[in-house]
Image: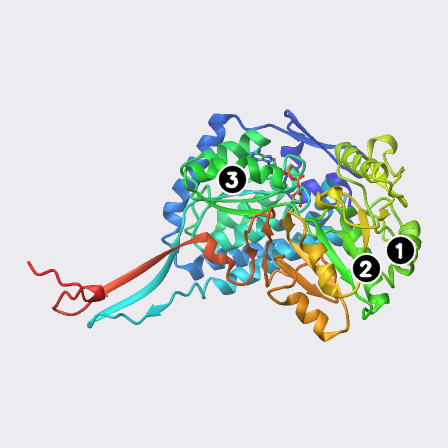
């Protein structure tokens, strides 16, 4: 699909052509996709006010009715999957199949949320007092602030919004300044559904257009009880104290530094495929991207050699072409950060295989790279940092798998991890309380490519948040413990007597 067809079928051709102070470029060839106008502080305030107003109506609709709106939105996404998937690819540079996959993830979470809209269960609790009844009820929370990163410009919003909406909340979205057209498109599709939906108030989804200042305004606004923010740990460090200062809830999905252990009992063919997708897929720009490969010393040379051959020949180029497996980095800053990381490794005496710049469509205006392998003798200070690019550090471990687990956990981040082994004892140890300290732990499958059914998120500097499936919905509601006395007496708990 051509750019103009994509934008017009999504209903945002005019918005993209309106002109404004935020130009948007495609990482594929550096071409300008459009430009939009940044929101003034007054605009942001007004949008948040509209969202607060919308919440007052939306929370009164039965949850299954709210689910019906999400069901219809999922249907519109199905009908527009091709155009939106293409736009994700144009704006992020991911492969077309990944662009489509992101929209599929939106559809999946909508389906999940529709089912959930009839399952927002609380508990009934046995009361210690005669003639009393206790129960837990989950109520809508308020307008939910969603801050999202460039690398998942639509799916992460959907994880949050689909749940927030069925839970009875309105949504204020501050998308990445690098992927604003995706955000405009999602809003346009959502509006198509919301306009026709009886009972859906205007302002159910508000979009803030801006950079850090728009994020800060959202985080500091006292009308937003929950900030769900996805992005770098640096961003989390900046916003967490501001949100906490006003006691807002925080759901943080921050940086990762995934590791995979390859034990002597691994199926090596399977491991090579999983390592390659996890390390170079999305050009190494996933929070779950594999950065540290922990290989048993007996396999080390063989695996480095095999991976070097794969990385050398893997097709890097235009992500719209079917044979391409690695698209561009998002921009020149990402390229500079990658080169700085490789220089640092070299300064520490490491050799670097690959990592050089390649030229694709757009010539100098786009940033393609050969994925890099950095064989090391041991983990180092620089392997503890997240570099958002396809760099794979390969680190040997000796003896028992416990040594590998120790290296794996010895980083500040705690998002995704994996082990390749056919040894049941090793696998179960890895999944046990003394195993991986990450939010995601996989056996015989790679570190990236999570499904929406599970709770997604990580520990330590990754922020501790959980989004998407399982019981993540609870973060978007407030819990009320209710006690009803249906007796003519007034017994007090713990047998306290207080007769007047
Ligand atoms: P980023 O931190 O630069 O930006 C993310 C979002 O935060 C953007 O919308 C940005 O405008 C906003 N922002 C940045 N600084 C801010 C501040 N001080 N105040 C308010 N808002 C601010 O991240 P990015 O480059 O877009 O994305 C890559 C990062 O996101 C990586 O670190 C990656 O690991 C992380 N990420 C994490 C997850 C997860 O689920 N854990 C998912 C995707 C991406």
Of marks 3 and 1, which one's residue comes earlier in the chain? Answer: 3
Crowd tier of the residue under label 3, counting other residues whose Cα lies within 10 Å: few below 14, some 14–19, many 20 or above: some
- The front one of 305 and 162 is 305
Q: Is residue 226 above or below residue 474?
A: above
Please determine whether, in this image, residue 186 is positioned above or below residue 20: below
Q: Position of residue 234 (x, y in %)?
A: 61, 37
Name the mark nearer the viewer: 2 or 1. Answer: 2
Residue 199 % position (x, y)? 41, 51
Per the model, the C-alpha gap separating discs 3 and 1 is 40 Å
Ranked by sequence position, the earlier of labels 2 and 3 is 3
Residue drawn at point x = 85 percent, y = 41 percent: 369
Which corner quadrant of the image does residue 15 belong to? top right
Residue hosting label 1: 304
Report helix, strand or loop for mark 2.
Answer: strand
- In the rendered structure, find residue 220 and report the number of the disc placed on it: none
Residue under the point 53% across and 54% down:
162
Q: Residue sitting at 72 percent across and 40 percent down? A: 91
Quadrant of the image containing the C terminus: bottom left
- Between 328 and 245, the one nearer to me in the picture: 245
Tell me which residue sits at (79%, 66%) in the image: 263
Residue furthest bottom as drawn: 424
Q: Residues within 10 Å of mark 1 (few under 14, many from 20)?
A: some
- Reply above or below: 170 against 221: below
Assess whether mark 3 and mark 2 are in contact (beta carbons under 8 angstroms): no
Of residues 397 and 191, the one drawn nearer to the viewer in this rendering? 397
The residue that label 3 is drawn on is 240
Would you say 275 lies left or right of 58 here?
right
Name the spot of residue 156 as percent of width and height, x first: 61, 49
User: Mark 1 and mark 2 in contact (Cβ < 8 Å)?
Assistant: yes
Residue denoted by label 2? 295
* C-alpha separation, residue under disc 2 versus residue under disc 3: 36 Å
- Mark nearest the camera among 3 and 1 is 1
């Amino acid at each position: 699909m051509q750019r103009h067809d994509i934008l017009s079928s999504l209903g945002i051709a005019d918005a993209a052509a309106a002109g404004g102070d935020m130009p948007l470029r495609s990482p594929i060839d550096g071409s300008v996709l459009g430009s939009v106008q940044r929101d003034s502080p007054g605009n942001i305030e007004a949008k948040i006010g509209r969202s607060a107003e919308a919440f007052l109506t939306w929370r009164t609709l039965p949850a299954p009715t709210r689910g019906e709106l999400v069901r219809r939105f999922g249907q519109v996404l199905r009908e527009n999957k091709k155009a939106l998937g293409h736009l994700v690819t144009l704006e992020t540079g991911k492969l077309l199949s990944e662009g489509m996959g992101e929209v599929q993830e939106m559809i999946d979470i909508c389906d999940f949320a529709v089912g959930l809209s009839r399952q927002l269960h609380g508990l009934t609790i046995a009361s210690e007092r005669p003639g009393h009844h206790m129960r837990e009820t989950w109520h809508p929370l308020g307008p939910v602030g969603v801050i999202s990163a460039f690398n998942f410009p639509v799916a992460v919003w959907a994880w949050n919004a689909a749940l927030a909406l069925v839970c009875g909340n309105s949504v204020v979205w501050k998308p990445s300044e690098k992927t604003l057209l995706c955000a405009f498109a999602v809003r346009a599709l959502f509006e198509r559904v919301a306009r026709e939906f009886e009972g859906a108030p205007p302002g159910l989804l508000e979009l803030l257009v801006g950079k850090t200042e728009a994020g800060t305004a959202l985080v500091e606004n006292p009308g937003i009880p929950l900030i769900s923010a996805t992005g770098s740990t640096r961003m989390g460090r900046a916003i967490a104290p501001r949100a906490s200062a006003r006691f807002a809830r925080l759901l943080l999905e921050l940086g990762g530094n995934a590791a995979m252990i390859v034990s002597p009992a691994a199926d090596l063919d399977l491991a090579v495929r999983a390592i390659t997708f996890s390390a170079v897929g999305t050009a190494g720009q996933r929070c779950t991207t594999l950065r540290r490969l922990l290989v048993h010393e007996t396999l080390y040379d063989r695996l480095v050699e095999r991976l070097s051959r794969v990385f050398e020949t893997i097709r890097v180029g235009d992500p719209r072409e079917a044979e391409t497996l690695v698209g561009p980095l998002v921009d020149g800053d990402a390229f500079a950060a990658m080169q700085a990381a490789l220089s640092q490794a070299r300064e520490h005496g490491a050799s670097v295989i690959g990592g050089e710049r390649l030229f694709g469509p757009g010539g100098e205006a786009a940033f393609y790279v050969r994925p890099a392998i950095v064989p090391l003798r041991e983990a180092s200070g620089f392997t503890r940092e997240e570099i958002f690019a396809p760099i794979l550090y390969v680190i040997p471990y000796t003896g028992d798998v416990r040594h590998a687990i120790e290296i794996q956990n010895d980083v500040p981040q705690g998002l995704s991890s994996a082990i390749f082994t056919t040894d049941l004892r090793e696998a179960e140890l890895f999944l046990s309380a003394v195993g991986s300290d990450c939010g995601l732990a996989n056996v015989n499958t790679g570190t990236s490519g999570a499904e929406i059914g599970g709770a997604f998120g990580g520990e330590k500097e990754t922020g501790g948040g959980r989004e998407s499936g399982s019981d993540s919905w609870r973060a978007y509601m407030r819990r009320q413990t209710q006690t009803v006395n249906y007796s003519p007496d007034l017994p007090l708990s713990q047998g306290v007597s207080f007769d007047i």
